[in-house]
Image (cartoon, helix red, strand yellow):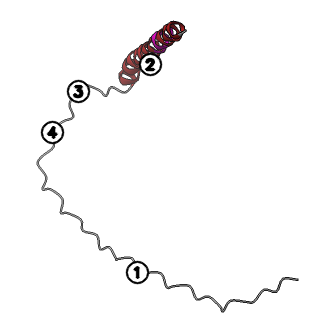
């Protein structure tokens, strides 16, 4: 009885590994063949832009950021009495 269970577990493990490997390679093949098509469309011109005269680097920009203030606590009214009938 135990031998049948181990054979079934072995076959199940082999099928699991087979499907994992198949899906893994299928996804990577699709990604590999799809990448060059995307890059070929986005390639810029290979002529370098003409060099401009050296310009002084722009001055850094500083921003003044205010610290968030705490929201005032909500004011609740006194609790009301509820009568059940």
Q: CA distance from mark 1 to mark 3?
A: 53 Å
Read off the magenta span.
11-16
**Residue receiving disc 4:** 51
Q: Earlier in the sequence, mark 4 or mark 1?
A: 4
Q: Earlier in the sequence, mark 3 or mark 2?
A: 2
Q: Quadrant of the C terminus?
A: bottom right
For marks 1 and 3, give the one nearer the viewer. 1
Residue 40 placement (x, y as % from top left): 36, 20
Q: Who comes first in sequence, dot 1 or dot 3?
A: 3
Q: Badge 4: how crowded within 10 Å, few (<14), some, or many (20+)?
A: few
Instruction: Say the numbered circle drawn on residue 69.
Output: 1
Q: Main secondary structure of the magenta part?
A: helix
Q: Is residue 80 above or below residue 9?
A: below
User: What label does residue 35 carry, if any?
Assistant: none
According to the image, label 2 marks what residue? 27
Q: Nearer the viewer, residue 53 or 3?
A: 3
Distance in Å between CA atoms under marks 3 and 2 = 36 Å
Q: Nearer the viewer, residue 4 or 11?
A: 4
Q: Nearer the N terminus, badge 4 or badge 2?
A: 2
Which residue is located at x 40 percent, y 80 percent?
69
Q: Are marks 4 and 1 in contact (CB under 8 Å)?
A: no
> Is 70 colored magenta in this rendering?
no
Label 3–label 4 contact, CB within 8 A: no
Observer-side mark, 4 or 2, equals: 2
**Few, some or many C-alpha atoms within 10 Å of disc 3 (few <14, some 14-19, many ≥20)?**
few
């Amino acid at each position: 009885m135990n031998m049948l269970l181990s054979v079934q577990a072995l076959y199940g493990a082999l099928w699991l590994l087979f499907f994992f490997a198949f899906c893994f390679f299928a996804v990577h093949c699709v990604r590999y063949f799809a990448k060059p098509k995307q890059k070929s469309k986005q390639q810029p011109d290979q002529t370098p832009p003409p060099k401009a005269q050296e310009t002084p680097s722009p001055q850094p920009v500083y921003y003044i950021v205010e610290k968030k203030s705490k929201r005032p606590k909500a004011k609740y009214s006194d609790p009301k009495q509820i009568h059940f009938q």
